[in-house]
Amino acid sequence: MELRPIDPTPSGLETLRGLLASSFPEATHLDVPYLRWSYVENPVGLVVGFNAQDDARLAAHYATLPVVARVAGREARGLLSLHTATHADYRGRGLFPQLAEATYRAGADGGFEFVVGVANAASTPGFVRRLGFQLVRPLDVRLGFGAAPAPGAATHLDFERVWDEPALGWRLRCPARDYRRAEDARGATLYAPTDRLGIWVELGRAIEGSSIQSLRPFRGLQPLRLWMGLDPARDWAHSSYFSLPMRLRPSPLNLIFRDLTGAGRRLDADRVRFAALDFDAY
């Protein structure tokens, strides 16, 4: 078994598509156009990750995407943990931790300072116990009517994604989604369909720029909306939104973090701003 950096060429993405299709048959959006958009076209940088190769056969895969975030008040490049897949014939051999550690070593060598991700119930123990991630806390998931409360000013944040116009434009070109915009006196808010009961999810507030102008307007005909993330500066107490109980969620959405600088940095969950725009659920 050989660990190799991900091959982002068309032939490499086609091979990867086959592994993802066999591992996640319900995730039909994981096709070559999606992988090219995600792994190659990101203006922050090419995918960072590794494949486990058994001669000509792709046995396992792990990918992270370069991002920019403000960590403890300073902008830094980091990695968003994304896809992991192992062929059925190779499960139980411990390939994922090997791929992950190779990825994080390559990331640290490339100047990336952290890894952040959203893990489900099945994957969280592996990230925390075997790979040394901090379980920051489960994301809030709220249902409500109309627009969610606007984010207020938050000071002394430990973590917040940073979006500029090129990065936001790339994010909104995701070929698997039909994003919309809603504009009011507070600015523009981005929405995505959840494909459940006509519910739309608020991705987050948008920076002004040409990328949002290409989106169709969100007319608000579906009043029930979803919000997920962490934000210490939103006033939920005086809103029409309620927290969705854990028992009603398909899986907890656990925010995880690992420092790659060697300083052992950890995040205070009450000082993190993180929204649906910041990861790959929608």
Image (spheres, helix red, strand yellow):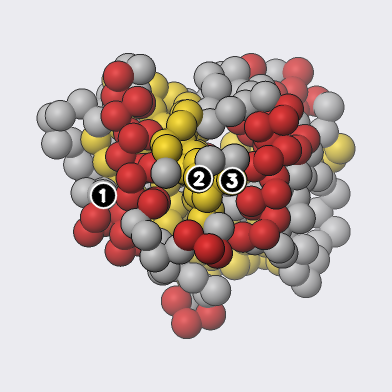
Please name the residue that numbered disc 1 is placed on.
Answer: 131
Report how far apart the C-alphas of labels 3 and 2 lie in the structure.
5 Å
Left or right, residue 156 beside residue 29: left
**Camera-nearest label, 1 or 3:** 3
| Above or below: residue 250 compared with residue 164 | below
Q: Earlier in the sequence, mark 2 or mark 1?
A: 2
Q: Secondary structure at mark 2?
A: strand
Look at 68% across and 35% down and name the residue there: 13
Left or right, residue 91 beside residue 145: left
Q: Earlier in the sequence, mark 1 or mark 3?
A: 3
Q: Secondary structure at mark 3?
A: strand
Instruction: Give, as a three-letter code, the residue at label 1.
Output: Leu
* Res 57 label: 3
Question: Residue 109: x percent and y percent?
Answer: 30, 19
Q: Secondary structure at mark 1?
A: loop
Report how far apart the C-alphas of labels 1 and 3 lie in the structure.
26 Å
Instruction: Give, as a three-letter code, the residue at label 3.
Output: Arg
* Res 54 label: 2
Q: Are marks 3 and 2 in contact (CB under 8 Å)?
A: yes
Left or right, residue 243 beside residue 195: left
Look at 57% across and 45% down and name the residue there: 58
Question: Residue 133: x percent and y percent?
Answer: 26, 49
Report how far apart the C-alphas of labels 2 and 1 lie in the structure.
24 Å
Residue in front for this viewpoint, 281 or 148: 281
**Camera-nearest label, 2 or 1:** 2
* Res 166 label: none
